[in-house]
Amino acid sequence: MQFKNPRSARWTKWAVWSLVGLLAVWGLAWLVVPPLLKRAIEKSATQQLGRAVQVAQVDFRPWTLELTLHGLRVASAAGDAAQLQVSRIYIDAELQSLLRLAPVVDAVQVDAPQLRVAHLGAGRYDVDDILARLQQPPASAPADPQRFALYNLVLKGGSVDYTDADVKRTHALRELNLGIPFLSNLNAHRDVQVQPQLAFVLNGSRFDTAAQGTPFTQSRKTDATLRIAGFDLAPYLGYLPPSLPVRLQAAVLDADLRLAFEQSPAPVVKLSGNLMARGARLATADAAPLLGFDTLSVQLDDVRPLERLARIQSVEMTGPRVDIRRSAQGRLNLDLSLDKGTGAAAGTQPVASTTQSAWNVSVQRLSVRDGVAAFDDASTSPRATVTLAGVMLDASAIQWPLVQPLKFSGSASVASRPPQASLTFAGSAMASAASATVTVSRLALGVAAPYLAQYLRPSLSGSLSTQ
């Protein structure tokens, strides 16, 4: 004969009823929480934003604390379109949130958010009403910052359409992806490194960035990278002030930069990496060509903007072209800052003196290849034109302020009727003195004929070679 232990039976019965109660609570929460939460989100968000907010569906799994919102939509001011819509928002909370009395979330994922913003002109936007509501001061005094621990923050497939009525253009941001593996301001997690990643395509130009840092420690140390491939500036030229004496007509930028920041105790910002500009074209206010180049590559060793220090390893330019013109009235197109009537800088005021130290800049190597310099002088009769082609320039040990000799050398050819003239030069320079050796071979004297026509008859011809 077997006898049952009354205590064991009570524990078994209690465990069974506890399990049944837990399952009942889970089932009730699974059925009741989604419609209640859906209604609460729509009501509260609509009151906060002043726009109709809708959620298509809410899913909640109380046994894993997983919450999913489907089809979030914020209406436009007119209510006939969506200002913002999100395909899915997924949140996976942890039971630690109850123990720490602070949100601890294992994963947050936002899928396919789509935002539409329009600039209506005169500094007005179609979201001004929302911003005004969000900027209202809180009714109560601000409390201590909310503690939190967030893991695996992901935004996938985002897009933004920004329509600007002033320049009559719509800017398109596509393939927006953001990932932050960990972010927390809890005391136990303050020293953990954060490694966010951001990538997107803006008007067809691809951007890719990454960073790592400890934003909640006293040093706030951060290391970031920025990669830009084929960033075309053409869509943004309409934002340049029309009063500028020089107009940028075209340029494409590439960048691979590294940024380091640390607060120890004074802030230190260091920038290094490579910058490249391609196909740049500058013109004067009347759209006449002024300056352009095929490529400009700059390799940065150590640039510290807060300390006004720049260490540049190399600057390389290929295919530069400069067009210098003098009008019949004797005004050079390079004279961009002087007002024609007064000779004073147009629209400028005297600049107050400052005690801020000047920049300290050094460039180890400067290289210019295949340059062209064209000079057109309409103030002479006949008109004088000179073109230097194949311009080559090399310089080293460049430093400003100049504390050591700057060494340079180069060559060019003077485009004229045969024989072709050539020019070579080499030398060094300091702040107070310079020396150079210049060699000219077979320079046609006819180049100077327009300037001597009123003094010499008949016209000047022949060639000159000298050193």
Image (cartoon, rainbow, N blue to C red):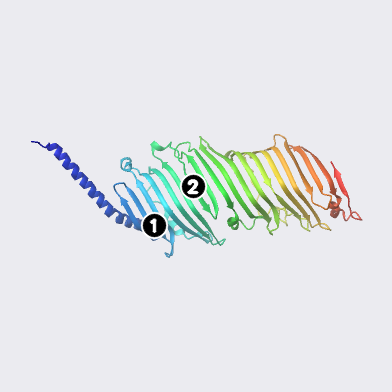
Which residue occupies the extreme front position in the image? 1
Q: Quadrant of the N terminus?
A: top left
Is residue 212 toward the left or the right of residue 144 in the image? Answer: right
288 and 279: which is toward the camera: 279
208 and 83: which is toward the camera: 208
Which residue occupies the extreme right position in the image? 458
361 and 464: which is toward the camera: 464
Is residue 306 toward the left or the right of residue 290 in the image? Answer: left
Q: Is residue 237 above or below residue 98?
A: below
Find residue 338 and name its label. Answer: none
Residue drawn at x 69%, y 52% as measured from the top left:
291
Name the residue that disc number 2 marks: 198
Residue drawn at x 27%, y 51% as measured from the top left:
29
Residue 193 spot, x, y in % from top left:
45, 38
Q: Is residue 120 above or below residue 151?
A: below
Which residue occupies the extreme left position in the image? 1
| Quarter of the rendering containing residue 314 | top right
Is residue 210 toward the left or the right of residue 75 in the image? Answer: right
Q: Residues within 10 Å of mark 2 (few under 14, many from 20)?
A: some
Dot 2: element: strand
Q: Quadrant of the C terminus?
A: top right
Of the residues shown, which amino acid type is indicated by label 1? Leu
Of the residues shown, which amino acid type is indicated by label 2? Leu
N-terminal label among 2 and 1: 1
Name the residue that disc number 1 marks: 72
Residue drawn at x 72%, y 47% as measured from the top left:
370
Residue 315 spot, x, y in % from top left:
66, 42
Residue 353 spot, x, y in % from top left:
64, 43
Q: Residues within 10 Å of mark 1 (few under 14, many from 20)?
A: many
Residue 183 spot, x, y in % from top left:
42, 42
Q: Is residue 382 visible?
A: yes
